[in-house]
Amino acid sequence: MLANCKLSKAIADMGFYEFRRQLEYKTQLYGSKLVIVDRFYPSSKTCSSCGEKKSSLSLSQRVFQCQNCGFECDRDLNAARNLSQEAVRLTVLACRLDSADTTRMKQEEKAGNC
């Protein structure tokens, strides 16, 4: 399930509902925001580079290869990139920002910081 055996066992033991509840609690505690993406979002089937969606992708295919742009990477990494992009998109929609407002600004350095 997951690379970290102890984490995998802990998640399997508590179930995903409890895992999500804990995430919601911790993000609220630390002032963060938890973004929930629809469970049927095709994160594995969508190219994180160009957005092209494959019609099918079997679990045995561990490398994602885009027929449209030629992008190739690990299937799970591609899905993680897609989920990250979707979370940003949902956050921007929730805040009603246009794409011009989402660019990063240069942070001024504080004196004395290493």
Image (cartoon, rainbow, N blue to C red):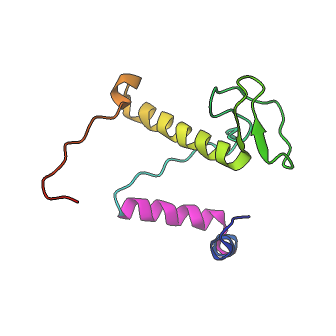
Quarter of the image where the N terminus is located: bottom right
x 61%, y 39%: residue: 82
Depth check: give the residue in front, 84 or 62: 62
Image quarter of residue 25: bottom left
Image quarter of residue 112: bottom left
- Looking at the picture, does residue 53 appear above or below residue 27? above
What kind of secondary structure does the magenta stretch mostly adopt? helix
- Looking at the picture, does residue 65 appear above or below residue 76? above
Spot occupied by residue 75 in the image (x, y as percentages of width and height)? 73, 45
Residue 26 among those drawn in magenta: yes
- Looking at the picture, does residue 98 appear above or below residue 39? above
Depth check: give the residue in front, 106 or 99: 106
Image quarter of residue 13: bottom right
x 62%, y 63%: residue: 17
Q: How many marks?
A: 0
Instruction: Please indicate whether residue 48 sits to the left or right of residue 106 in the image.
Output: right
Residue 66 among those drawn in magenta: no
Instruction: Please indicate whether residue 60 sits to the left or right of residue 39 in the image.
Output: right
x 37%, y 31%: residue: 102
Quarter of the image where the C terminus is located: bottom left
Residues in magenta, as a range: 13-29
- Residue sitting farthest toward the left: 111
Spot occupied by residue 80 in the image (x, y as percentages of width and height)? 61, 47
Instruction: Please indicate whether residue 59 sits to the left or right of residue 52 in the image.
Output: right
Spot occupied by residue 94 in the image (x, y as percentages of width and height)? 42, 35
Spot occupied by residue 16 in the image (x, y as percentages of width and height)? 65, 63
- Residue sitting farthest toward the front: 114
